[in-house]
Amino acid sequence: MSRLDPASPTPDALTTLRVREAMGGDASSTAWLVERFSPLLLAQASHRLRGPLAALARTHAPEDLVQDVWVRALPRLDGLAARDGRMTPVLVRFLATTMLHRLNSLAQTHLRADGARRQDSLDPAAEARFAESARIVSQIASHERIDVVRRAIDALDDDDRTLVVMRAIEQNPVNDIALLLGEKPNTITVRYRRALDRLRARLPGSVFEELQDEE
């Protein structure tokens, strides 16, 4: 019997438990997190590799950026603390911020000619965790479930997909999104909720069950 199943925890509680176990080095919980949250990062990377950062898309695929983010983020999970008893919004924001930092770093270094990835200087213990993170991410990156969720996100129209990235993943305030997109805050809120409802209907039990419209 799985230690995670007896009380059938809610999705939020399950994520919190999985993060805690991943902090302790549990490989199965780490793989669970990578599988569950990678589609969000793929959507974010695909969205951001447009406009001013479009040049990056020629040398950096969204899948590669997602792997980069996980390899950098997993050894740092122990720095996260739940917000109002929920780990999901904290983890999503942490991953999205890590992605933005990675993209900014690539832009600032003008895409090194050899495409080499910079690895932060780490002490031996952190280096070992970094290597283990890379191994787990590599094993789970092509999981079928990730592709199913990704296709559901891709099926949204461009405007709704943009809202999911900006609101659910990057957790920008509604007023900021409305100003950027030239729409009323109430319109943004309604459209965002409808987009989430569509994803939840197509993907029961997915991470979208855990995402809320938090002000």
Image (spheres, rainbow, N blue to C red):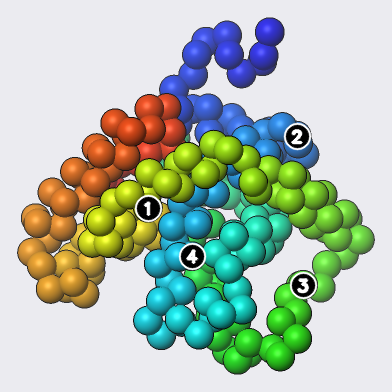
Gap between marks 1 and 2 measured at Cα: 31 Å
Q: Please state the horizontal and vertical placement of residue 143, each as a whole percent of the image.
A: 62, 40
Mark 2, Cα crowd under 10 Å, few <14 / some 14-19 / many 20+, is few
| Residue 119, disc | 3
Mark 3, Cα crowd under 10 Å, few <14 / some 14-19 / many 20+, is few
Looking at the image, tell me whether mark 3 or mark 4 is earlier in sequence order: 4
Q: In this rendering, would 42 be left or right of 171? A: right
Vertical relation: 168 (above or below) 100: above
Looking at the image, tell me whether mark 2 or mark 3 is earlier in sequence order: 2
| Residue 26, disc | 2
Gap between marks 4 and 1 measured at Cα: 12 Å
Tag 1 residue: 154
Secondary structure at numbered mark 4: helix
Task: Indicate the amino acid at tag 1.
Answer: Asp
Task: Indicate the amino acid at tag 4.
Answer: Ala
Secondary structure at numbered mark 1: helix
* Disc 4 to disc 1: CB gap under 8 Å: no
Looking at the image, tell me whether mark 1 or mark 3 is earlier in sequence order: 3
Q: In this rendering, would 134 be left or right of 167? A: right
Task: Indicate the amino acid at tag 2.
Answer: Asp
Q: Please state the horizontal and vertical placement of residue 69, each as a whole percent of the image.
A: 62, 61
Tag 4 residue: 45
Between disc 1 and disc 2, the foreground one is 1
**Image point (61%, 79%), residue name:** 59
Q: Residue furthest right?
A: 124
* Disc 4 to disc 2: CB gap under 8 Å: no
